Image: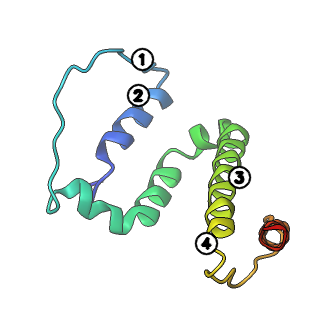
Amino acid sequence: MRSGFEDWDFFLTLLSEGGTIGIVPEPLIEYRTAPASANIRSMSGRVDLYGLLIDRHRPLFEAHMRDALLALESRAILASARAEELMVRHPEEPIGDISYGDGGMASAVRIASARAAR
């Protein structure tokens, strides 16, 4: 994990070996970053690094797959609702290509209906 996410890999290794991780309520360190830091640079390869983490810790990911996928879906629903609000407030913006199977069509209908009601 020399390209980034080494801290995440470390924590997952602890968990996979039966360890636990706790959250301390007060800050114990000061964290700073800069545009040239490895933390920022690693974001360009985030999908590949995340895939590597999944491959390295597959049993841990599989054990929590349902909860993780449902949490991601919940975040996607919130992000979609925010995007819909913006689209309704800015009718000059085109709706664009509509996706299917992920709520895209329903979202486009809600936006068009709300725009027409204004």
Seen from the viewer's position, the closer of residues 104 and 9 is 104
Which comes before the other along the chain, label 3 or label 2? Answer: 2
Which percent across, then down, holds residue 118? Answer: 78, 68
Disc 3 versus disc 2: nearer the observer: 3
Q: CA distance from mark 2 to mark 4?
A: 48 Å
Compared with 60, 88 (above or below) is below
Disc 3 versus disc 1: nearer the observer: 3
Q: CA distance from mark 1 to mark 4?
A: 44 Å
* Disc ID at residue 22: 1
At label 4, which amino acid type do we have? His
* Disc ID at residue 53: none
Which comes before the other along the chain, label 2 or label 1? Answer: 2
Query: Can you identify the residue that label 4 sits on?
Result: 90
Q: CA distance from mark 3 to mark 2?
A: 32 Å
Seen in the image, is 67 located left or right of residue 42?
A: right
Which percent across, then down, holds residue 24? Answer: 35, 15
Query: Can you identify the residue that label 3 sits on?
Result: 77
Q: CA distance from mark 2 to mark 1?
A: 12 Å
Q: Are marks 3 and 2 in contact (CB under 8 Å)?
A: no
Seen in the image, is 9 located left or right of residue 69?
A: left
Seen in the image, is 64 located left or right of residue 107?
A: left
Q: Are marks 2 and 1 in contact (CB under 8 Å)?
A: no
At label 3, which amino acid type do we have? Ile
| Secondary element at tag 3 | helix
Q: CA distance from mark 3 to mark 1?
A: 29 Å
| Secondary element at tag 1 | loop
Query: Can you identify the residue that label 2 sits on?
Result: 14
